Amino acid sequence: MSAERSLFEAYREWQRLAKACQKAISLRNWDFLLQCQGAIKELQPSIAVATLKVRDEWNLSRADRTAEETRLRATILELMALLEANKKLLHDSREMALTKRKELDLAGQNLRRIQISYGSAQRATVRGIA
């Protein structure tokens, strides 16, 4: 397999994993998200090596590399757009979780106030004050 083909297959795999990350975030499946991110991390060194080999192949062939470079750039830009969308989706999910946590914290505080209030009223009733 040529280095070029290997490189583009690796980028396709990264795109597949980025789409899987998107689904994991949407489903709030954090274990699956971590698995996908781990797979991406393992894939990156092979992309770096393949990129160097591709550049060497292109230099040795002395062919006009404009089309190949354009195709590679388009693939990378598409991947970057996916990663940016995932980043936004993750940010939005985090913001929703923080908002929900604040709501739950307030509800907990209100519940404690009610418990204290009823506890004071019960003690007063027991003492015959009420």
Image (cartoon, grey):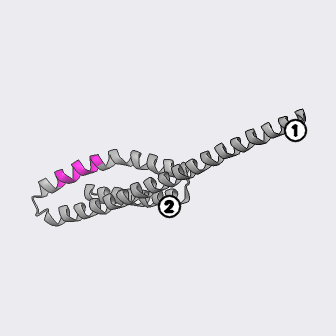
| Real-space CA distance between mark 1 and mark 2, rounded to the nearest whole angstrom | 57 Å
The image quarter containing residue 7 is bottom left
For badge 2, the amino acid type reads Lys
Residue at (45, 56) in percent of width and height: 92
User: How far across and down, in percent of the image, does residue 40 sit?
Assistant: 41, 50
10 vs 110, nearest the viewer: 110
Examine the rendered structure and indicate whether residue 83 appears above or below residue 119.
Answer: below
Magenta segment includes 53? yes
Nearer to us of marks 1 and 2 is: 1
**Majority secondary structure of the magenta segment?**
helix
User: Closest to the observer: 71 or 29?
Assistant: 29
Q: Which residue lies under the disc numbered 2? A: 23
Report if residue 34 is visible in the image. Answer: yes
Q: Quadrant of the C terminus?
A: top right
Task: Give the magenta range.
Answer: 48-57
Residue named by callout 1: 125
Question: Relative to 93, does residue 108 appear above or below in the rendering?
Answer: above
Q: Secondary structure at mark 1?
A: helix
x, y (%) of residue 28?
55, 55
What is the total number of numbered labels drawn onto the structure image? Answer: 2
* Callout 1 amino acid: Thr
